[in-house]
Amino acid sequence: MDIDSMKNKTMRIKAPDIGVRSSGLGGESTQSLVDLLKATDQQHLKKTRQARMFIMIATAAFLFAFVMTLLDPGSDDRGRERQMMYGSIVLVYILVSIVYIAGVRKLARVDHAVPVRQFLLEAERRYRFMRRSDWMLSLGGLLAVIVVTTIGYAPYLSRLFGFGDDPTAMYILFPCFIIIVAAFGFYFTWKNWRRDRAPLWHQIRQMQDELESSSNDVR
């Protein structure tokens, strides 16, 4: 299915005509949008599965490195630092893997056979930029990443950037660096959403309004 072609067709969606309004379920325009959402869901599911596999492979690689440091920690504090560094990365990747696995399962369970109104309601939630649960998960995940990686990397980075063996300064600077990176990531994620998913979200909202208006006219 040519998703770009369907997007162009869906952009021309108009309000259902009188015959369609009598059914209260939309018509060809509604079906075009539903078909596009189904195709986009499947495409997004495929990409999410591919990303999940990459993340799980990276997790396994860092887990192997972490286990090797446990088997041969070395005789000085550097060995313990390596354990903390690899261990922190493993924890971060495990957290990201859990998020991706949950996302794959959620997308795989989308029921495309439900009534149109329910399908559009669920699709509106999926295509919205950030829900309250997404904000909570993102902020909680960011806090976990800051704590785990700062503990794991601060001593090493302190020596690397000439602060000596006292990592106090790095315990302040490194979280600030992570927050800046996260802010840039958030901004580009928002831009990608505006480019790829916002048009569909607006079309979903428009169709919901039109179907609601159709129902009110029938009454």
Image (cartoon, rainbow, N blue to C red):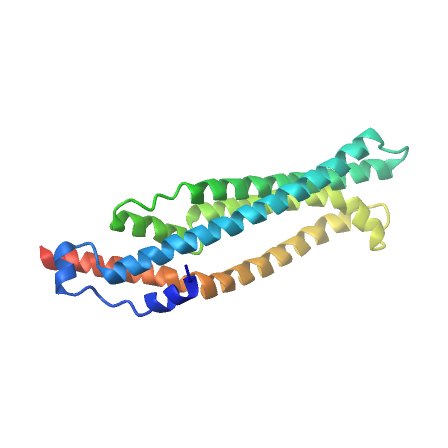
Residue 148 visible? The answer is no
Residue 140: percent from the left, percent from the top? 55, 43
Residue 114: percent from the left, percent from the top? 28, 44
Residue at the image position 42 percent from the left and 56 percent from the top: 40
Residue 78: percent from the left, percent from the top? 86, 39
Residue 55: percent from the left, percent from the top? 62, 45
- Dividing the image into 4 quarters, which one contains the N terminus? bottom left
Left or right of residue 197, residue 29 in this image? left
Residue ranking furthest to the top = 71
Which residue is nearer to you in this view: 13 or 192? 13
Residue at the image position 53 percent from the left and 52 percent from the top: 47
- Dividing the image into 4 quarters, which one contains the C terminus? bottom left
Residue 49 visible? The answer is yes
Residue 96 sits in quarter: top right
Left or right of residue 200, residue 162 in this image? right
Which residue is nearer to you in this view: 99 or 157? 99
